[in-house]
Every structure is written in structure tokens, then in C-alpha cells.
Amino acid sequence: MAEGLGVGICGLGTVGSGTFNLLFGNRAEIESKVGTPVEVRLVGCRRDHPDCDLAGTRVTRDIFDVVGDSEVDVVCELIGGTDAALELVRGALDAGQHVVTANKALIAEHGAALFELAAEKGVQLRFEAAIAGGIPIVKAVREGLSGNRIEGIAGIINGTSNFILTEMSGLGNRGFDEVLAEAQELGYAEADPTFDVEGIDAAHKLTILSSIAFGVPLAFEHIYTEGISAVTVDDIRYAQELGYRLKHLGITRRRESGVELRVHPTLVPETELIAKVDGVMNAVLVSSDAAGTTLYYGAGAGSLPTASSVVADVIDVARSVGATHAVSNLGFAGGTSDARVLPIDETRSAFYLKLTVEDRPGVMASLSTTLSEHDISIESLIQKDASGGQVPIVLITNEVQESQFDAAVRAIESADYTQGEVTRIRVVAFN
Ligand code: HSE
């Protein structure tokens, strides 16, 4: 094998082109850090990328040529999806090649078997770029905070949905559909925006983070996922009046009875730093026993930010190849804990509740009686102007178990003073 570390890039789209250009542009810097050259020795791509000068680089149109290529020590899987990507990663690990991937769906859904295969073959499978693009959150949790007991993680880990909510929260009074169309025009949203706005992309990322933080097996099938397509500008405005910002959060927290694992629209007190993360930016907040609360902020997508994480993983492989200590995937703790993932009705949140009631004496008293019968108290409340004999009421409760809140909502919805359906949004504070 040639001297140095040979890299094979599979896929020359947004992330692949950034990875190619970063490895080439910073090659001297990288060599000085690693002590040996790190070279792209083969690129597998269906077509060239206008931003990449491939002259002098071996190129194949069949990405599977990279698997087992004698000059490639590390395969960067940057094609996305879970069909060809799974076959490619399996093949590379099986051939004794290290793999670096940016593919969150692949790790969240097939990670357990892939890590097992990597361990069996004595190679590394790294995935920093799969979560929050350029933010080195995997390394922060796995290495920087490794001496801590992690208590919880909350993240804005999908830039598209954060962009949409930020725009809906602005002065333009723009609704979900209008802002989604703009996000698509700007190229933020995935080709199929469902993954972004319905929380599936965030759920993939959170599943992996939870597994790293708590050692629970990758449990994508158990995560609770709710998107932002039903969010209204009215709810955002009312919540703002009460001092909250609406964010699409992934939350995973350690509780005595298990681990919370959920993605949903969440109201956060406006004074918290994470509430101020706007536009396409990502942020991940980690609560741990020694370091306390730490917050990581940066670009969650994009060519060079995501490539930054891919290249960091390649460099980690380069540094550890030939090391005398065993560098394995054991830092990936998935499967070392048997804590169960809590169903959503066992999680705890405060709640925003909006309902329309009849405009007559005693209604407010009845509403607070119903809540107190379910052991729920009101933290704040606004009553809007009455019109046509009806009054909108918006309130925030204390923190309660979700099943307890569900029961109260059922009672309120069936009360004779309630007009139509109620709206509820979870409220979570981190400080
Ligand atoms: N579509 C994702 C986002 C980026 O909007 O954050 C890639 O994970």
C-alpha cells in the first residue's frame, strides 16, 4: 500500500464536492497535523461536479469500484439514502476499509449491524457529519464530555424547519406553506421536504445522539416524531406574548424510568440562548453533571461545513491507524444500557393550551377547576377579546406527565363551555 492514508469519495454532490475540495485545499495543513499525507485516491461519482477539478484524480462512474480498492484505506460514503449506501458501507467494512459517512438515516436505522460488522473486521465507522453538519457534536459528547454523566440533550438539528419557524415568527405574518416554498427555492429543504418538516431528519439525528449519550441501542422505531406543518402564526404570536419562542426541538433526557426521545414543536422561554437560534443555523444544548450546560452552535448543513466534519473523521482514522492502543467503535456506546425509551405519554413537559370558550360567567372558574382536578396548575394566562359570544384563552401550565395532561384535555374538550378543538404545544425549559 502507498505511503499515507488513501481516501475514496463516493458521491460528488454537495457534501462530496466539499470533502474533495477541503482535503485538497488543506492538504498541507492536514499532513502537518497527521504526520502523513491524506490523499483522495479514487472518486466514485455518476457525474463530475462543477466546483471540483478532478484532473489528476482517478475517477470511476461505478461507486462500488471504491469498495476493496487497494489504494483506498477510508471510504467516505456521501451518496445518502439507505439502499445503495447500505450495500456500499457493508461492502467496504467487509473488505477491511474504514468508513466515514454523513448519512444519518443509515446510522439511525442500520447502525447496530454496521457497528457490529466494523468491530468484527477491526475497522472504524465514523459519522460526525451525520448530525448538525459542521458542529462537532459527536466528538463533544463522546470525547469532550466523556467524563460526565449526560443528563439531557436538546437540539435544533434541522435547519430547514428552523428557517421556516423563524420566518413565521417574524413580522411578515407569513404562514407555513409560503415559507416552505421559499425554503425550497433557496435550496434549504430536501428534495422531499417531508423529511425536514415532519421531523424525520431530526429524529434520525436525535436517535444517534441519544445512543451516544445514554448507551441505549439505536432506537429509531421508538422515537416520537411530530412535525411543524400544523403550526399556525396565531400560536406563535400568542406564545410570544407569553414570553416564549417556538422551536422544532429534538429532546432526549435521562429519567429514572427510562430515556425520553422525542422531536416536536416546543415552546422555549425567550430568555434561553437556544430560543435565539434563528434561520438555518443549528444548535445543540447538552446538560451534564460536571460541565453543566454547554451549547454548540453552527451551520447544520452546507458543502464545506459538513465536509469539515467528514474530514475530521478521516483525520481521526489517519491518526489512529497504526496506533498501539485499540481504537475501535466502542466510543459509540449504543447498546450498553438497557434503559427503555419512554413512550410519549410518560414524558414530562409544561403545556401551552389554546381554546375558545363561551363568553359567560363561571367559565374560567370551571376551566381552572378541571385543570386542578388533574393536578395541573396555570402558570400564566391571557384572555383575548370576545367576539360573537366566544373568547379565545391561551394558558401555560406547570410541568406534568403527558398522560395527565391528555386526560385534562379530554375533559376540557368535552365540557359544554368549550367551542371546537383545543391546541396544545409542549413547553420545555432548560436553565
Ligand atoms: N436538510 C437538513 C436540514 C440538512 O435542513 O438541516 C442535512 O441534514
Image (cartoon, rainbow, N blue to C red):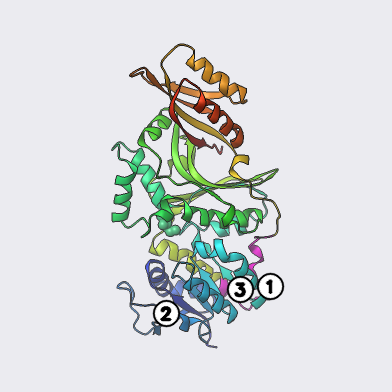
Q: What is the secondary structure assignment of the residue under circle 2? A: strand
Which one is closest to the eye, mark 1 or mark 2?
2
- Circle on res. 326: 1
Amino acid type of the residue that numbered disc 2 sits on in the rendered structure:
Val
The image quadrant where one finds ligand 1 is: bottom left
The residue labelled by disc 3 is 320
Residue in view at x 42 percent, y 82 percent: 62
Start-end of magenta stretch: 317-335
Instruction: Judge from the rendering whether residue 53 lies leftward or rightward of residue 204; answer left or right.
Output: left
- In the depicted view, which residue is nearer to us: 415 or 276? 415
The reply to whether the C-beta atoms of the residues labelled 2 and 3 are less than 8 Å apart is no
Against 53, residue 415 (above or below) is: above
Q: Provide residue 290's location: percent of width, then percent of height.
A: 66, 46
Q: Residues within 10 Å of mark 3 (few under 14, many from 20)?
A: some
Image quadrant for the N terminus?
bottom right
Residue 323: say if magenta.
yes
For the residues labelled 2 and 3, the Cα–Cα distance comes to 23 Å
Against 361, residue 429 (above or below) is: below
Which one is closest to the eye, mark 2 or mark 3?
2
Amino acid type of the residue that numbered disc 3 sits on in the rendered structure:
Ser
Q: Main secondary structure of the magenta part?
A: loop
